[in-house]
Amino acid sequence: MVTLIENLINGLSMGSIYAIIAIGYTMVYGIAKMLNFAHGDIIMVGSYAAFILISTMGLPVPAGILASVVICLCLGILIEKIAYKPLRNAGSPLAVLITAIGVSYFLQNGAMLVFGSNTKSFTSVIPAQIQTLQIGPFQVKGIAVVSILTSLVLVGILQVFINRTRPGQAMLACSQDRAAASLMGISVNNTITLTFAIGSAMAAIAGVLMCSYSPALTPTTGAMPGIKAFTAAVFGGIGSIPGAMVGGLVLGIIEQLSKYYISQQVSDAIVFGVLIVILLVKPTGLFGKVIQEKV
Amino acid sequence: MAMLQVTDLKVNYGVIPALKGISFEVGEGEVIALIGANGAGKTTTLHTLTGLIQAASGKIEFEGKDITRVPAHKIVTMGMAHVPEGRHVFPDMTVYQNLMLGAFTRRDRAEIDANLEMVYSHFPRLKEREKQVAGTLSGGEQQMLAMGRALMSNPKIILMDEPSMGLSPIYVNEIFDIIGKVSSEGVTVLLVEQNAKKALTIADRAYVLETGTISTSGRAADLLHDDAIRKAYLGE
Ligand SMILES: Nc1ncnc2c1ncn2[C@@H]1O[C@H](COP(=O)(O)OP(=O)(O)O)[C@@H](O)[C@H]1O
Ligand SMILES: [Mg+2]
């Protein structure tokens, strides 16, 4: 029983990291109507930035994290402006998709060029005193608690931002009807840029948390979590923020339980297998809507 | 000079011309009807006026300013509101949130509230359904919401694209009554309609659009009694 609960907590914490990434995925999809397959690689850039700033240059942890958030935010805006925006009215969603895959490779190879392909050992941002916590009978990693709390705080801030602020309302409006949004005086271009900025900033935080969990940092560090977060977003219903949150958490738990109780090796296969089954039963995902035209 | 002056406007979709050089004007306070068959280019005209589509050539002037290349999101602050064909309400937002998005570019809370009261007085049904999600409204209610949302920007001119399309006769009458009221409050109206009879009854002047060119124009009352128009557009 104790191990089960510990496993659930671990799954939940990995899941909350997936959720943070998945929310970025789903927001960009909802507003820019594109799958940003380079999203996972932003995580990797954020992790390298934090690694260099904190471990190599000795910046204090909060300052290092903040700086890596700012770096990813700028990178997200830059990628959108250079790679995606020129294709926005090109009419082919495939062109954007292929470009996103190209950006993903560009970032991975760029990182290989700059940082080399050897594995760096990321130093956890969690202070040594709270690396492991004893909560009642349960032994929990400090990073697990921090991850869960961080994702809760981020989702809370995001909810308030979207529902209570003008840029947030603009994002909602653009996600539902771009043409109508621009008739309201909303700049669709600026709103898409903002969405990339927010998604990428969240990816940086996810990167730091993830590397504090498992410290091996390579240029392809972001690839697998990126795919898993994408899976989580589809699972929850692509475009839906609550869906991405729930999708991330469920995915993290399934992964952890199958790792522990079934097999370390096939856990990924199980995760994707469950996804396929769910999509067969409910093709729009948990919170997805069937798009209907009203006349 | 007229409030809205359109000169030799040409618009293409790819290589296919949709507007082949149309000119018309809308004077302050007028109700102008733009009628024509399906596919004549009415929607294209309104889309080009509010910057949703770029003109290939020609000129659009609003209150003396050249707005031909002004992007869509800057048009509304100049005082031009567009009620698009098919309503385009924000389906997952409430009636109230939709109306507030209509006032997106405005900052003065007191003015916005006063405007909201005005909209609710025109459309009491919207007030009753303030918290209802727009996607669940009936077609007629969505049309009212789209009009109310446009009025929330406190426009000088309102462009309406087929507001009666697909509505039951009761709603059609109600919508036209409200267009009359809005006009009497001093808002200029450019009304696109396939329901030519209704449109000509309410309008001061009208233009007839035929496959991208303006074939006829004149006082609405005269067009209403013009034999060719009656035959082609009034089904008589
Ligand atoms: N997005 C588009 N792409 C290509 N052709 C279009 C598009 N929208 C409209 N058209 C064409 O332009 C012409 C005018 O259309 P439209 O302005 O919608 O007419 P109306 O509103 O008078 O029914 C039609 O021939 C239509 O097929
Ligand atoms: Mg039309």
Image: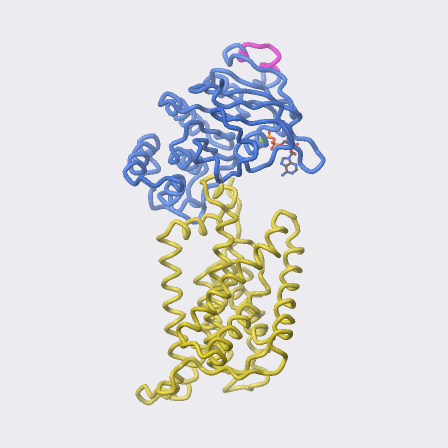
Q: Position of residue B195 (x, y in %)?
A: 53, 24
Q: Position of residue B213 (x, y in %)?
A: 64, 22
What residue is at 54 percent from the left and 64 percent from the top? A234
Q: Position of residue A154 (x, y in %)?
A: 39, 66
User: Residue A244 versus residue A214: which sits nearer the camera?
Assistant: A214
Up/down of B173 relative to A152, above or below: above
| Magenta span of residues | B223-231
Q: How is the image coloured?
A: by chain
Res. A12 visible in picture: no
User: Residue B143 versus residue A89: which sits nearer the camera?
Assistant: A89
What residue is at 47 percent from the left and 59 percent from the top? A240
Chain A: give its colour: yellow
- Does residue B99 appear left or right of residue B56 in this picture? left
Which image quarter: residue B215? top right
- Does residue A111 appear left or right of residue A18 in this picture? right
Chain B: give its colour: blue
Which image quarter: residue B95? top left
